[in-house]
């Protein structure tokens, strides 16, 4: 409730300006708002929950903003071009840069066949509001806003990045420095745009125009990504570690540690997402694959914000970041923890420097001799560096996202059901993970590596691969059988039945594919339910549809997750629980299970290599490049076939009669 002690709004306007502002607000604010609520900033800057009122056509007496999302859906793209961001980027004329970039975006939208509403604030900041005939989901709108932020220096994506508190000040609203937001077109044109929102063809054309920015967002990033800060249009209260300066001139402090010099003043805050990780230790497993990646993101954020290692150490000593301290608790003593922290700090500094000069690095990969070694469930998997260009790799990544869209459509359509369906989905996600790690839709990973990604037995993976390649209108194409030590080659393809769904390109954020090791014990139902849970409550009724499960399987998954603290029930619905999957896996002995499996895999490989060596000795003309890879009867009579080879997806090499 508002109190009588609240001061009057700053600035005074002549009578005709007040009438114009009131008419603009009455005509447009209810149509731009996602719901029937308006939030006031009685001090001109802070939009507090307690100052939220019912939205009416009457212009509020204070700075006011309306919500962007309602139930995770938005009918308008909130384009906020901010003068402060232009000034921070070093623009000689910040207002002129805002005006130029706004005009460029409006022209881009016009080339796509769309139209919009635009206004300007007294200090020069501008809003471009783009209506859509079909409401867009939070992930879709957020990714589009983040892509625009990559193209335009002054574009602020924060209003679209917060599903609960994303706000935008509509035309006619008062500004904290006096005056109000004025339309740059006539009110009649603005009303016409409201009555004629942009259709799906404009959305698709805009995505095509922003393809480079969208695809760059989907590339795996070693550091922190864009964040959903509490959205106040035109305000930037925190320094986002996702956007380091264009050039990283690292210096060395008195202790010999690198850091990024910054202007004098208070220590910049990390983004809310990174601060939450540092304080609670909780992170989104879809974005970070392990606690070490989450802690590295926090350290990289601190480096990007101009912190020094001593600042981080002080926060840990003072107990301000218990979550980050917990990530280092695995080390045996204080000296080992300090060494690990320094190593993380130097890795983050190197990443920042390489990112500034256009190179790539990743703390979870090792490179040597044209081969990348990627850590998968504790096993270093060797993947050849792609020989394709960066543009081709981006194209392959784009195809993998479209393939995943088709897979989601198939799951919703009930293409695979029951326990068999869960197994198929796990194998397909393993193939998707392999494709993204290989940066190619054509993959040559053995069933054992795929089994690690799917958290399944390799024999189950082998049988499922046979099933998938023999399906009508399949998701995978069998390109070549395994030969010697070379694995079978598959290519991910979009079935014709789901080509339209793939073309929508409603990409999911974060990393795709694979199953967390803990679900090797907890099961597939729990894995898919955990995937759809988040901080926003889900009703029990909605979980089966979102997870692609039956009611019984979804309830079983919820029950399993709740027993281990991975899911919790609130008054509004189900959310992710406080437990860390890594800690649950440790309690269940998952690491020991995986270690035993990997030892057996190594023994299998050693036996297979030995068998191949003997075969080569028995038949000197055994040529690895010839098309006929079948073996003579004499080889089988002498050696037999290793038992595990019979379980491969394509079986052992075919026997043939010896040529006399």
Image (tube, rainbow, N blue to C red):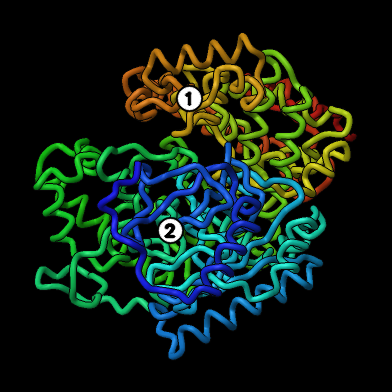
Q: Residue at x 45, y 76 (%)?
A: 83
Nearer the camera: disc 2 or disc 1:
2
Label disc, if present, on residue 591 of the rendered structure: none
Which of pointers 2 and 1 lies earlier in the amino acid sequence? 2
Q: Position of residue 298 (x, y in %)?
A: 31, 52
Q: Position of residue 524 (x, y in %)?
A: 57, 20
Q: Residue at x 46, y 84 (%)?
A: 94
In this view, 92 is above or below 38 = below
In this view, 57 is above or below 378 = below
Side of 407 relative to 294 (left or right): right
Q: Residue at x 24, y 39 (%)?
A: 323
Q: Secondary structure at mark 1?
A: helix
Residues 281 and 602: in front is: 281
Side of 317 relative to 31 (left or right): left
* Viewer can see residue 214: yes
Task: Check the picture and name the quadrant holding the N terminus.
Answer: top left
Q: Position of residue 469 (x, y in %)?
A: 80, 31
Residue at image mark 1: 600
Side of 178 relative to 275 (left or right): right
Residue at image mark 2: 61
Task: Check the picture and name the quadrant holding the C terminus.
Answer: top right
Residues 249 and 514: in front is: 249
- Badge 2 local density, few (<14 within 10 Å), some, or many (20+)? few
* Viewer can see residue 362: no
Residues 443 and 206: in front is: 206
Q: CA distance from mark 2 to mark 1?
A: 72 Å
Q: Residue at x 59, y 71 (%)?
A: 119
Q: Secondary structure at mark 2?
A: loop
């Amino acid at each position: 409730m508002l109190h009588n002690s609240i001061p009057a709004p700053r600035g005074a306007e002549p009578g005709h300006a007040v009438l114009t502002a009131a008419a603009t607000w009455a005509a447009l604010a209810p149509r731009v708002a996602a719901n029937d609520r308006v939030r006031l900033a009685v001090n001109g800057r802070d939009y507090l929950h307690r100052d939220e009122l019912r939205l009416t056509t009457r212009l509020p007496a204070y700075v006011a903003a309306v919500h962007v999302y309602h139930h995770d859906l938005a009918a308008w793209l909130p384009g906020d071009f901010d003068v402060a961001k232009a000034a921070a980027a070093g623009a000689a004329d910040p207002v002129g840069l805002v005006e130029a970039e706004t005009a460029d975006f409006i022209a881009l939208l016009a080339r796509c066949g769309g139209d919009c509403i635009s206004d300007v604030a007294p200090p020069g900041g501008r809003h471009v509001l783009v209506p859509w005939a079909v409401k867009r989901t939070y992930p879709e709108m957020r990714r589009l806003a983040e892509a625009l932020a990559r193209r335009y220096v002054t574009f602020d994506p924060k209003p679209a990045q917060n599903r609960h508190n994303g706000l935008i000040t509509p035309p006619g609203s008062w500004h904290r420095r006096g005056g109000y937001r004025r339309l740059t077109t006539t009110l009649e044109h603005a009303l016409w745009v409201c009555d004629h929102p942009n259709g799906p063809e404009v959305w698709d054309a805009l995505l095509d125009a922003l393809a480079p920015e969208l695809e760059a967002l989907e590339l795996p990033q070693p550091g922190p990504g864009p964040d959903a800060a509490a959205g106040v249009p035109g305000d930037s209260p925190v320094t986002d570690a996702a956007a380091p300066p264009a050039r990283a001139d690292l210096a060395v402090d008195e202790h010999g540690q690198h850091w990024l010099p910054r202007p004098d003043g208070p220590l910049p805050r990390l983004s809310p997402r990174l601060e939450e990780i540092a304080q609670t230790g909780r992170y989104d497993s879809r974005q970070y694959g392990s606690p070490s990646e989450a802690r590295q993101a926090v350290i990289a954020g601190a480096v990007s914000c101009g912190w020094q290692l001593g600042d981080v150490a002080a926060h840990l000593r003072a107990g301000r970041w218990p979550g980050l301290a917990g990530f280092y608790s695995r080390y045996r003593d204080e000296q080992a923890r300090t060494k690990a922290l320094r190593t993380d700090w130097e890795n983050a500094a190197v990443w920042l420097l390489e990112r500034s000069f256009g190179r790539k690095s990743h703390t979870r990969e090792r490179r040597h001799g044209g081969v990348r070694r990627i850590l998968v469930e504790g096993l270093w998997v060797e993947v050849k560096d792609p020989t394709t260009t960066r543009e081709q790799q981006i194209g392959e990544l784009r195809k993998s996202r479209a393939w995943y869209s088709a897979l989601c459509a198939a799951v919703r359509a009930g293409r695979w059901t029951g326990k068999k369906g869960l197994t198929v989905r796990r194998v397909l996600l393993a193939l998707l993970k392999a494709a993204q790690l290989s940066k190619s839709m054509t993959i040559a990973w053995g069933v054992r590596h795929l089994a690690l990604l799917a958290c399944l037995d390799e024999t189950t993976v082998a049988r499922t691969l046979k099933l998938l390649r023999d399906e009508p209108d399949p998701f995978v194409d069998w390109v070549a059988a395994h030969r010697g030590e070379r694995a079978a080659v598959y290519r991910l393809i979009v079935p014709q039945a789901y080509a339209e769904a793939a073309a929508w390109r409603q990409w999911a954020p974060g990393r795709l594919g694979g199953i967390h090791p803990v679900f090797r014990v907890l099961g597939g139902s729990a894995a898919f339910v955990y995937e759809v849970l988040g901080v926003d409550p889900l009703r029990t009724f909605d979980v089966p549809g979102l997870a692609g499960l039956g009611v019984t399987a979804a309830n079983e998954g919820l029950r399993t997750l709740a027993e281990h603290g991975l899911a919790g029930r609130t008054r509004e619905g189900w959310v992710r629980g406080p437990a860390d999957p890594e800690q649950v896996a440790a309690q269940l002995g998952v690491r020991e299970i995986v270690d035993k499996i990997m030892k057996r895999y190594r023994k299998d490989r050693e036996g297979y290599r030995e068998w191949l060596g003997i075969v080569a000795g028995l038949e000197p003309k055994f040529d690895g490049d010839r098309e006929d890879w079948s073996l003579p009867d004499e080889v089988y009579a002498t050696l037999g076939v290793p038992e595990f080879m019979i379980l491969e997806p394509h079986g052992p090499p075919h026997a043939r009669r010896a040529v006399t």
